[in-house]
Image (spheres, rainbow, N blue to C red):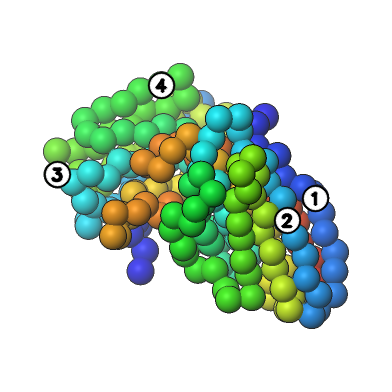
Amino acid sequence: LAKTTQPISMDSYEGQEVNITCSHNNIATNDYITWYQQFPSQGPRFIIQGYKTKVTNEVASLFIPADRKSSTLSLPRVSLSDTAVYYCLVGDPPSGTYKYIFGTGTRLKVLA
Amino acid sequence: DSGVTQTPKHLITATGQRVTLRCSPRSGDLSVYWYQQSLDQGLQFLIQYYNGEERAKGNILERFSAQQFPDLHSELNLSSLELGDSALYFCASSPGTDQEKLFFGSGTQLSVL
């Protein structure tokens, strides 16, 4: 059973801001929220991680509301090279161990 | 470059055969993770090792096994291969075990004919 739910795909145009929302209704108290980017035939690449409120780095921002049941990855001014699959991960700690479960991800296509 | 090295990059074999995929984690990382990615199944978590010990197990078939050696490199063994095992196999590493970011290798493309 998937722990996260994301839109399957999104289209955007160059220069626009893109927001991808992930639902994680069963997030546990200790869980962090992590986003990865994957290009075809390459391994996923870490983008950003957060626990609550807002986190920003040189690539993206992550917004997490107070109830933490969802999170939004924000990519400012996307370019064609941002076309990729974006995954939202939530830690899954059964029995004290952690499993890094990737969902289906969101396939972002940036158009010229 | 993530610092995680996987070999070989490509592997072509026949049904019923056995293959070994190798992963060298980033320097200093103690955890190694294996993932399988096929077109119809997405990115599937197989297994995690931490400092030589199995830490977590995902959707790994009984025909598959893995281990992490004292020098921290890991091997994923796939036996009695079937056509459906054709996929991209990724290895990732992290310093410890607690929801850190994962660093992925470039993968091994396995084709079972």
Lower sequence index among marks 2 and 1? 1
- Relative placement, left or right, of B23 versus A55 is right
Comparing B29 with B113, the one in front is: B29
Q: Nearer the viewer, mark 2 or mark 4?
A: 2
Q: Chain of mark 1?
A: B
Whether label 2 touches label 1, CB < 8 Å: yes
Q: What separation in Å lies between label 2 and label 3 (alpha carbons)?
A: 42 Å
B100 lies left or right of B5: left
Provide the residue designation for mark 3.
A67
- Find residue A101 and name its label: none
Amino acid residing under circle 3? Asp
Q: Give the residue at mark 2.
A: B21
Kind of residue indicated by mark 1: Pro
Mark 2–mark 1 Cα distance, whole angstroms, equals 7 Å
Disc 4 on helix, strand or loop? loop
- Tag 1 secondary structure: loop
Callout 2 touching callout 3 (CB < 8 Å): no
Label 2 is placed on what type of residue? Leu
Q: Residue A84 falls in which quadrant of the image? A: top right
Q: Where residue A94 appears, x then y in whole percent? A: 30, 60
- Same chain assignment for discs 2 and 1: yes
Q: Position of residue A90 (x, y in %)?
A: 34, 49
Give the crowd class for mark 2: few <14, some 14-19, many >=20 residues within 10 Å. many
Q: Which mark is residue B8?
A: 1
Q: Which residue is mark 4?
A: A57
Q: In percent of the image, x 44 and y 54: which residue is there?
A: B55
Indicate whether B87 appears above or below B14. Answer: above
Crowdedness of circle 1 by 10 Å Cα count: few (<14), some, many (20+)? some
